[in-house]
Each structure stands twice: as C-alpha cells, then as structure tokens.
Amino acid sequence: MSVQNTGGRLGQSGQTERGRVAPNSISSQSPDQMLGMWTTWLDHLSAAPQAAQKIAWAQWPSLPDPVGPSVLPGNTDQLGKSLASDPLLRSLDQIWNANPLREVVPIDWAEIAWALRTVWLRSAGKPKAAMSLVEFHQGLWQAFFEAWHEAGQRWLSVFGFSPVEESLAASRDKRFAAPEWRSNPAYLALKQLYLLASDWLLEQGDAADMDEAERQRLNFHLRQFVDAMSPSLMLMSNPVALRKAIETGGASLADGARNLLADLSAGRLSMVDAEAFAPGRNLALTPGKVVHRNKLMELIQYTPTTEQVHQIPLLILPPWINKYYILDMQPKNSMIRYLVDQGFTVFVISWKNPDATMDSTGIEDYMDLGPLEASDVARDITGSPSVNAMGYCIGGVLLTLTLATLAAKGDSRFNSASFNVSPQDFSRVGDTAVFMNEPTLDLIEQQMMERGYLDSREMSNMFSLLRSNDLIWANVVNNYLLGNKAPAFDLLYWNSDGTRMTRAAHSWYLHNTYVENNLIKPGEITLKGEAIDLGRICQDTYAVGCEKDHIVPWESAWRVTQLFGGDVRYVLASSGHVAGIINPPGGKGAYWTREESAGAASSPEEWMKTATKHQGSWWPDWSAWLSDRAGPKGAPPPMGSAQHPPLANAPGTYVLER
C-alpha cells in the first residue's frame, strides 16, 4: 500500500480534523520549514551510522520540534544562495555513504535530493504552501493527541468499553502490522507522525507547477524517499525486530549481519532463496522436447495430453528480458500445461541469455531467429500452413513488429494473434517513464557499449523500485533486521532469474518505443525493407490488460483495439502484471469483457463503463476464443520431425544459463 493513500488522514474515524487548531501551532510559519525539519532530521540520522561499527543499525532519533527548526530565507533568490552548499544533499550523502545498504539497494539519492530541493524551492514564498504547512502542524498535534486518546480507549476496553477501530487503509499497511503500532501510544504516535509528514511532502509534489513528465518524476522520487524513511526500517523503532532480538539473545542481529555480508559480497539484495528452485527440478515441469535451436533461441514443443488436438498450433513468444517459465511455473498454475490439456499443440520460444559476443544482434535478428524461424519449424512439424501466436509483455511488441512486417509483404503465416499485457502505444507507460529520461538512457547506452549487453540486474532494479515497499524494503527488514533467510517463493525466484539484453536490439527498442513512440506512427519504422503500419495487421486479435499493472497500464494495452485493422477482443484482468496473467481457473480474481454489440469504445474509460465483470480466471474465455480459430481436431503431430529431431527434454539448456 502506498503511503500517499494513508498519511495525514488517520484518526478515530480515519480522518484528521484539520479545522481544529492545536494550541502550539503557529500560523506564521514559512513553507520552507517543513523541508528544514526533514533536513535536520537527516542531519541527526547521518551521525548514527558514522559513529557505529562497520555493521550497525541506525536508531530513530528524537524529531526536532516541528515549530522550531531554523527558518530559511523566504526570498527565492536568497534561498537559492543558501542552497549553494546543498545541505540536504550533504546529509543524504553522509547517510548513504556510511550505510552498507548502498551496495545492495538501488536507491538514487541524487534524484531524491533533486526532488526535495525542487519542492523546497517551489514552495518558497507561496501563501498556499504556507497554509498547507499550517494544516500539517494542526494534523501533527492532532495525531499525537488522538494517539494517546486511542491508546487509553484500548486500555479501557478491558473494562467493557468498545475499542477504537483503525482506518481500513492503515490496517492494510503491512509495515505497521505489529500490534504495538496500534496499542502502544509511542509507536502509534510515531506511525502517525511519519504518515502525516509523508502525506504533506507528497501533496507538495502533486501541487507542483510543472509539466506532467517532470511532476511524475518528482512524485516518484518523493515516494522513494518517504518509503526509505519509514520507522519500520530501523531497529530501534521496529517492535518486531526488537522483540526478536530480545527473544533470541541477539542471535537474530548476528544472523542479519551475516545476511548483509553475503549480499554485499554478491552485490545485490537477496529477494528469494535461490537454492529452493530450479527449472526442470520443481519449475518448468510440463513434458516436452527441444525441437530446434539457433544462436538466439530454443524452440520447445510440448507433449500432447489429449487424444485429439487442434490442427493449427500455438506459438508463444515470451519477453526476451525474462525466462519463459513464468508461463510454466508449478503444474497448478502453468498456462502451458493448461493449454496443452485443452487440446492445443503448443510451441514456446526459450530465449538465449546473450553475452558480449552477441553485441551486434539487432531487432531484425530477433524477428528472423525468433518468431519467423519458429513458425517455420512449427508448420513443418504439424503440417499446418499457419500458426496462431501469443506474445507476453515485450514478446508481444516483437510479435507486433513481425505481424506488421509480414502484412507489408503479404505473408499470412500467422492466423490469429494474442497479446498478454503488451503495449503498442508507449504514451502511457506509468512510472517506468521515470527511467526513460535522457541522462538515464545515456547511462544505459554507455553501459551497453562497455559490456556489449545490458545486465539483467538493471531491469530488475527498475521493476523493484516500482514496488519498493514490497520488493526492496520488506526484504531489508526480513533479511537484516529480523535475520531471516530470504523467502522461498517461485514468482520471486523467476523475477530474479532474468536475461541480459543485446546492445543493438535493446537500444533500438528503447528509442523506438519509450523515447519516440514510433510503433504507432505509420511508415516511421522500416524493418526488413518494409515500412510498417499497425493498421495493416488484420488478424483476429485477443488482448489482455491488467487492472493494477504498474509496468503496462491497462489503458495502454487497450490501445490495440484502435491501432490494429482486424477484429480485437479486449479483456481486462484483475491484479497486476504477473498475477493477473498467471491466474488459472479455480483461483481468485476477476475479469471484464465488452461485447461487440455495445459498439466501438472511443476511450478506455468508455470501454470500462460498459464492460461486464466476471468472477474467476480469463483463461477459459481465451481458450474458447482460440479454439474457434485453431481448426478442427485430429491426431496429434509427432514430437519433432525428420528435419527437426528432438535435441533435449524440456525445459532445454538455454533456460539454465546465468
């Protein structure tokens, strides 16, 4: 849960009574003072790790009086001069340089410092911001009074009084799940102070007068800051960690230190028990054979489980930045096994993990050696003149490029196309846009030029920052404060098992999608000698977006309905980028559909207003749609052919490469 949805609104009924003026609030405060308080706070924090031993945990200090920090100049010019020495950046540098976590946590403190300075400068001398600060002070004192009041009421509940109910938003914040955050007045006050301060800062970002891209960048880094400053991340203000340290006689702290040393040695934060899983041992278990191999991919054909299968096979293109087995995790949630059990002949591309020798492998190589060569092999083995194809995430981008190029050539080998959380229009890309500014892209290009590829950790770090509380800070608490082993979770294992990206292909991809958004511009891209136009793609199409997708917003995935020239069935699944797709029948979740009789929708918002919600998995809906386009059923084809004999058992060899 994001703190910006909870801070500053917590009280007996979940709302702070901002109209009530606390006795000690002062209406003449400068708007700069809130950021001054944060700076003073950071200065206090910076001293703790420097004075500690090599591995030590910073304690939560006493916060300076919110109405008494040093007042910075109200004049913008004077304020700019006073910032020349950059005290905020100095404090941040002191903290981070003295903190061993800097080696394993991918936080960009320079960007955070920029965000805080921006809020500071833009709030200087603005009456509206000054009123906001007054409201913050009122809420701050109100939170303290209510914290003690609530604690008293909880104690009185022993004598038959009804306890105060916590707001729903606060109760769902996993960082503050320990009972002390609700029952102990000191912890309760600390939590509400943190949430109020976080909310105040995030509100300043929302109100900043700047273009949308800069505001998005500002808000993203402000959220990173407030997440990183949570009191739950420090030993002396984490009741669970303190309790465990006492119960174990300090053994949990020693275990946490060992975990930190191991992660420092590996240069990364452990998010999963890497020894608990392995493809072919307890992941990627659906039986099949590698029937083709080239320098970029292995093609896996899966063993049929039904007496009859559809005539037209299905070719799946996973993203080339991930291992394919997200679609074949455990038997209970394997999309591949499900499709095979529905009577489809399934082929899946398993991408090579490229090294520096593949530096010049470009996007056309991915097309030639990927979907085009794989479709030739699948047609040869099955005897079908065409194949159906499905692209997952950026595997769908590659499928889109291939379909548009073949449409220009008049090649109709693909019968239908399916897309799972795949973007074509990159004008809406959520918070990933923060990582696509010019300095970041220049750094990526420099790294790829030096190595010949982009390390998979770079992409992993980016996706982790999009959900930093769940994927970064929860692991910091678990591994280091509590001294636990990293969890054994199959999805997290897959998430950490990424692939590198060749320099040429990835550079082309970034500039033609995120930077210039050329896919939606007819004739702007030329591939294999053909100017492509997505409007020429006339295959029947099934596209899935996910309601809470933070990588491909569902509105972006919906745009395929307007860009392609054929009939498109769009389905919206609940949950996020992975959980919304890997959601087999029998599990939780829901999905929305909109029938053709409702007419074409002009926007995703209009589509949603007239869509119908269904409980359960969207897989049966897709299976029924695909069955209508997969031809009649007959005897299964052989596993491989004379020209393409089986080379190895699934999951193959490329998926095991690190």
Image (cartoon, rainbow, N blue to C red):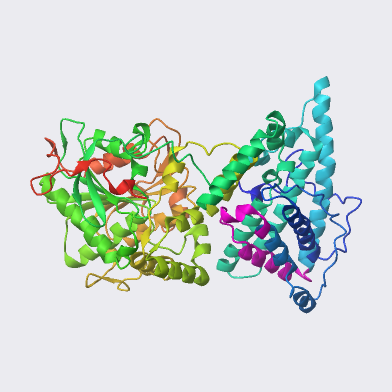
Residue sitting at 71 percent across and 42 percent down?
235
Name the outermost residue toward the right.
23
Residue sitting at 45 percent across and 64 percent down?
427
Q: Is residue 169 left or right of residue 47?
A: left
Closer to us: 95 or 437: 95
Instruction: Note whether residue 173 is visible.
Output: no
Residue sitting at 12 percent across and 39 percent down?
638
Closer to us: 599 or 483: 483
Closer to us: 9 or 469: 469
The total of numbered circles placed on residues is 0
Mostly what secondary structure, the magenta segment? helix
**Res 328 quadrant in image:** top left
* Image spot of residue 144 (x, y percent): 83, 44
Work out whether 315 lies above or below 338: below
Magenta residues, start to end: 97-126
Work out whether 287 lies above or below 369: above
* Image spot of residue 156 (x, y percent): 83, 26
Quarter holding the N terminus is top right
Was residue 112 drawn as part of the magenta stretch in this picture? yes
* Image spot of residue 29 (x, y percent): 85, 63
* Image spot of residue 633 (x, y percent): 14, 37
Was residue 632 drawn as part of the magenta stretch in this picture? no
Q: Is residue 234 left or right of residue 303?
A: right
Name the outermost residue toward the front.
53
Instruction: Note whether residue 89 is visible.
Output: yes
Name the outermost residue toward the left.
642
Name the outermost residue toward the top.
159
Work out whether 188 lies above or below 51: above
Q: Is residue 405 left or right of residue 232?
A: left
